Image (cartoon, helix red, strand yellow):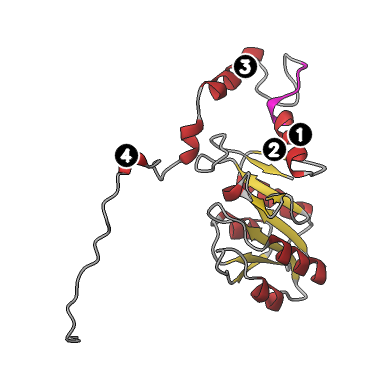
Amino acid sequence: MDTGKSSKLYKPTPIDNDALLPYEWPGSYFIDEEEIEAVTDVLKTRSPFRFYGHTNEESYSARLEKAYCQKLGRKYALAVNSGTAALTVALRAMDIGPGDEVLVQSYMWISCPMAVVLVGAIPRLVDIDDTWCIDASDLDRKISPRTKCVMMVDMSGAPGDLEGVEAICRKHNVYMLEDFSQANGGKFKDKYVGSFGDMAIASHQYNKNLSSGEGGIIV
């Protein structure tokens, strides 16, 4: 349709791509001699299995769990093989299964609703606000008698209203599970992400800022 106005195609200003970190797999750019030395150390002990082997030294997995507990003020931590496994185990620990409903924000990674389906529960989407995380007001409206857990996902490096969501979960007596995979090390006000709710998980997959190639943690 001719509106009488000239139409110009928007052309972005060129940028120096060499000055930016590649978008793909940022975790790989923090692998250096320290990581290589740690892997070599495990192989030298001939004890790649964390629970027993040729050494009585504390495993790297156990050290990781203790570090998370200390950093986040959590009582327990469990290292697992992936973020998806962490979500699934956390939901199982909350005794969530068939007939239960888990509220998940509409902008998230596919593993979040997939873990809900894996335990036989029903994922129900909640709108997001300007933080790209759960909209607390929409969450308050959507909690039903079938709701057993709210999954709060800290997306794209920034947390949402963690305190507000936590308060709503307490009000309705439902679990809060925080997924802080994409904001690991960040804070909401003066508290680290991962320290909110009943349980929290993080993925250590290749594309995360804290990466082991693959892996996960439950706290």
Amino acid type at circle 2 is: Ala
State the residue in front, 7 or 219.
Answer: 7
- How much space separates mark 2 and mark 4, taking CA atoms? 36 Å
Image quarter of residue 99: bottom right
Question: How many residues crowd mark 3 within 10 Å: few (<14), some (14–19), many (20+)?
Answer: some
State the mark number for residue 41: 3
Q: Position of residue 27 (x, y in %)?
A: 50, 38
- Region in magenta: 56-61
Question: Which residue in the structure is indicated by mark 2?
Answer: 79
State the residue in front, 94 or 143.
Answer: 143
Circle 3: element type: helix
Question: Which residue in the structure is indicated by mark 4?
Answer: 18
Circle 2: element type: strand
Say which label, 1 or 2, has the lower sequence index.
Answer: 1
Amino acid type at circle 4 is: Asp
Question: How many residues crowd mark 2 within 10 Å: few (<14), some (14–19), many (20+)?
Answer: many
State the residue in front, 120 or 210.
Answer: 210
Say which label, 2 or 4, has the lower sequence index.
Answer: 4
- How much space separates mark 1 and mark 2, taking CA atoms? 10 Å
The answer to the question of whether label 3 and label 2 lie on touching residues, with beta carbons closer than 8 A, is no
Mark 1 or 2: in front is: 1
Q: Position of residue 109 (x, y in %)?
A: 54, 56
